[in-house]
Amino acid sequence: MYELFIATFVTFFVVIDPLGIAPIFAVMTDGASTSFKRRMVFKSTLTGAIILLLFAFLGSGFLSALGISMMAFKTAGGVLLFMIALEMVFEKRTERREKTSEAVLHEHELEHEQEEAVRVQQASTKGGQKAVVPVSDEEDFEDISVFPMAIPFIAGPGSIATIMLMMTHHEGSRTEQGVIIGALLITILVTIIMLLMASKIIDLMGQTVANAITRILGVILAAMAIQYIFDGIKATFMG
């Protein structure tokens, strides 16, 4: 059980990648109040956890309804995880996440500028002078908890495939499935802590160290993904 917990925790930690999410979250909430950051952290992790738990308990039935065998899903999931691992090793995953966050920030800035212009017009006095209405922290920063934080950063294709693979592989044991859920929840807890301390963690480690850790975890994930692929092919052709 201890080995299962460690293996599952490492897998979830690598796939969710709080080390990669933390700097992006820090950039997207730069200048926001501490209360706003905390609210975004708890909302995003709670939403992501709920989505993953739904797939953990209902994913197998969903696949059966579609006529997809678990071995086919295991092989496909292994391929998907291997692609994610390659992106981590070559830093493509972080680059893609940064582009997503930049697009979201740009969209929020445009919306904020439009709202500010409307606010100024509505606040115009009868004498023709314009009074600028103060903008609260709530209006300055858009809600990023569901997108892109919960989806796809926390509950993305990789983490969804992982939780379904793990739960189905240990379908006969509720105890082992409980260990898997426990490992997921611990990973979510670690993610919460790292997001709350995002700015401090990045300053402490430095981007170079963070990139090195991401690459090492990518290699580990690649090995796990290959094992999934081998197991799926072996079970399909050798029964």
Image (cartoon, rainbow, N blue to C red):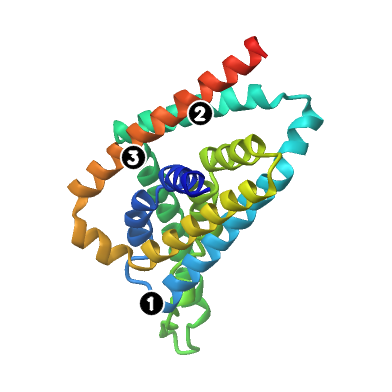
**Local secondary structure at mark 3:** helix
Q: Which residue is located at x 45 percent, y 72 percent?
A: 38
- Name the mark on residue 215: none
Ranked by sequence position, the earlier of labels 1 and 2 is 1
Query: What's the amino acid at mark 1?
Result: Ser
Ranked by sequence position, the earlier of labels 3 and 2 is 2
**Local secondary structure at mark 1:** loop
Q: CA distance from mark 1 to mark 3?
A: 32 Å
Along the line of sight, the residue nearer the viewer: 100 or 175: 175
Quarter of the rendering occupied by the C terminus: top right
Q: Quick one: label 3, few (<14), some, or many (20+) residues within 10 Å?
A: many
- Name the mark on residue 33: 1
The residue at which mark 3 appears reads as: 217
Q: CA distance from mark 3 to mark 2?
A: 16 Å
Let me know if residue 92 appears in the view. Answer: no
Q: Which residue is located at x 48 percent, y 49 percent?
A: 2
The residue at which mark 2 appears reads as: 80
Relative height, residue 10 to residue 227 (above, below): below
Query: What's the amino acid at mark 2?
Result: Leu
**Local secondary structure at mark 2:** helix
Residue 125: percent from the left, percent from the top?
48, 88
Residue 26: percent from the left, percent from the top?
33, 61
- Using residue 170 as the reference point, say whether residue 112 is left or right of it: left
Q: Residue furthest top?
A: 237
Relative height, residue 130 to residue 85 (above, below): below
Of the two numbered discs 1 and 2 in the rendering, the one whose residue sits closer to the viewer: 2
Query: What's the amino acid at mark 3?
Result: Leu
What is the tally of numbered marks visible in this picture? 3
Of the two numbered discs 1 and 3 in the rendering, the one whose residue sits closer to the viewer: 3
- Using residue 41 as the reference point, say whether residue 197 is left or right of it: left
